[in-house]
Image (spheres, helix red, strand yellow):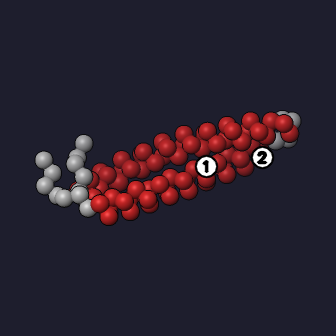
């Protein structure tokens, strides 16, 4: 049993910071995917395919940012013992 009390202020700040970082990562992934589309496929495909490219890029950015976020969180939890720092129970 973890005897460290939960510091709700730290947890709230961590969740807000992690959410902002995840959204920033998603935006970066989306921009990179759209640049990749622009460089490779925009000259080959008709202009009507841009809608599909945006949708696919958005979904891929969402998946990529989620996977990177999970791996980064796992690394940070192991390296810096975030569970103890935030006063959370270990899994």
First-in-chain label (2 vs 1): 1
Indicate the position of residue 17 as horizontal and vertical percent values.
Answer: 44, 60
Indicate the position of residue 26 as horizontal and vertical percent values.
Answer: 57, 50
Q: Which mark is residue 29?
A: 1
User: Is disc 2 surrounded by few (<14), some (14 to 19) or many (20+) residues within 10 Å?
Assistant: few
The answer to whether one can see residue 51 in this image is: yes
User: Is disc 1 surrounded by few (<14), some (14 to 19) or many (20+) residues within 10 Å?
Assistant: many
Q: Residue at x 17, y 58 (%)?
A: 4
Image quadrant where residue 7 sits: bottom left
The answer to whether one can see residue 80 in this image is: no
Please tell me whether residue 63 is drawn above or below residue 81 in the rendered image: above
Q: Which mark is residue 39?
A: 2
Cβ–Cβ below 8 Å for labels 2 and 1?
Answer: no
Element class at badge 2:
helix
Q: Residue at x 32, y 64 (%)?
A: 9
Nearer the observer: mark 2 or 1; the answer is 1
Between 71 and 22, the residue placed more toward the observer is 22
């Amino acid at each position: 049993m973890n005897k460290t009390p939960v510091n709700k202020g730290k947890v709230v700040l961590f969740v807000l910071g992690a959410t902002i970082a995840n959204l920033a990562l998603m935006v970066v992934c989306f921009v990179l995917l759209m640049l990749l589309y622009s460089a490779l496929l925009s000259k080959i495909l008709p202009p009507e395919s841009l809608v599909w490219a945006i949708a696919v890029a958005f979904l891929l950015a969402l998946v990529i940012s989620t996977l990177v976020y999970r791996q980064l969180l796992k690394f940070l939890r192991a390296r810096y013992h975030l569970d103890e720092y935030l006063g959370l129970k270990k899994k």
